[in-house]
Amino acid sequence: MRKPIYAPTVFGNNYYAKRLVAVCTTLMCFCILGCDSLIKDVKPLSSVTKALDHLEELPPRVAIHNLQPMFKVEATGFTAVDETGWDWAGSDEIYAVWHSNVIVSTLIQGDVDSGDSFDFHSLQSCIYPIAGDTLIIDGRYGGEDSGWICKEEGAASPIQFSVVFYEDDSPWTHIPFCFSGSIVKGCEDQFVGKYNGVWNTQELLEILPGIGDIQNFTVRLNPCEGPAVCGDDNFSDYDFHFRIVRMADKEVLRQHSLQ
C-alpha cells in the first residue's frame, strides 16, 4: 500500500518559522548569559599592561625654588715686568685675547716698555660671561663693533676662561688678523704669555661670601707656549690684573621627584 504524499500546508510554513524563532531566541540567550564569562576571559595586551604599570610607578614631581650664586670676571689691566726682546730695541705693542663663552681681542696698546702698566678699555674689560650672540669679536683696531659688556646677571659657577697675550707684529708681517675660532691660526704675532682660570662653587664662595664682594687678582702670565719652547731665560714677563665680582643670587626653578 502506497504511503500518502503530503503537500505543504500553512502549518508546515509555520513550523519552519517557529524553528527560526527558536534558534534566534537561543542565540540571544547565549549572548546575554555568556557575555560576563567572555569579558572575564579577555586580557589586555602585555605592552599595554607594562605601559600602565610604568605610569603608576612614576613618583609625583614638585617645583623647587633655589638661589644660585652668580659671578662675573673682568680684566683691569696689565704690567710689563719685562718686555719682549731687548729694552733698547723698541717698545711692545700688546693686545689680549679672552677665551670664554665668546672669543674677543682687546685694543692694541702701543709704547709698552718694561715697568709700564696699562688699563683695559671699560667696553673691552669683560671676560666672562659676555653678553650677546656674537662668537668672535676683533677689537684690536677699535671701531663701532669692537666693544662688549658682561651679562647683567652674571653667570653661575663653575667659572672657566683663558687669557692669551700677543705682541702685534703686523706692520712687519702684514698679517693684520691673527686669531680665528678658538685658537690663533697662521699668526706671525709674537706669543707673550697665557693664563687659565678655573674656579668651582666652593672656591668662589670662600673668597666671595657676600653679594657684591670683589676679589682682585694679579697673576704672572706663563711665557711658555708649549713644552718644546719652555726653559729660555729670555722670555718676557707680564702680569695680568683681573677681578671676580659676586652678583645677586638668581632663583632657578627646577623639577624634582618625590621618592
Image: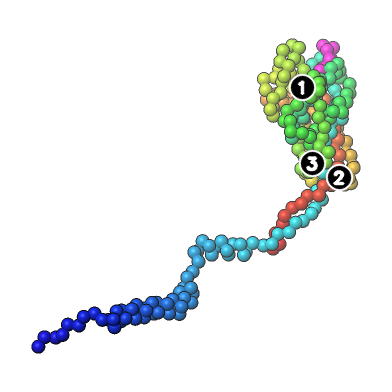
Neighbours of disc 2 within 10 Å: few (<14), some (14-19), many (20+): some
- Quarter of image, res 239: top right
Residue placed furthest toward the left: 1
Q: Which mark is residue 61?
A: none
Q: Residue at x 79, y 36 (%)?
A: 129
Residue 21: give x, y in percent of width and height.
37, 79
Residue 167: give x, y in percent of width and height.
78, 19
Instruction: Report the number of discs.
Output: 3
* Of callouts 3 and 1, the N-terminal one: 3
Q: Residue at x 59, y 62 (%)?
A: 54
Residue 139: give x, y in percent of width and height.
79, 23
Q: Is residue 118 left or right of residue 30?
A: right
Q: Residue at x 88, y 39 (%)?
A: 215
Q: Determine whether label 1 and label 2 are within 8 Å by CB.
A: no
Q: Residue at x 54, y 64 (%)?
A: 49
The residue where tag 1 is placed is: 166
* Of callouts 1 and 2, the N-terminal one: 1
Q: Quadrant of the C terminus?
A: bottom right
Q: Which mark is residue 248?
A: 2
Q: Quadrant of the N terminus?
A: bottom left
Neighbours of disc 3 within 10 Å: few (<14), some (14-19), many (20+): many
- Frontmost of labels 3 and 1 is 3
How many angstroms separate mark 3 from mark 2 (CA)? Answer: 10 Å
The residue where tag 3 is placed is: 155
**Disc 1 marks which amino acid?**
Tyr
Q: Secondary structure at mark 3?
A: strand
- Frontmost of labels 1 and 2 is 2
Chain part drawn in magenta: 87-93
- Quarter of image, res 118: top right
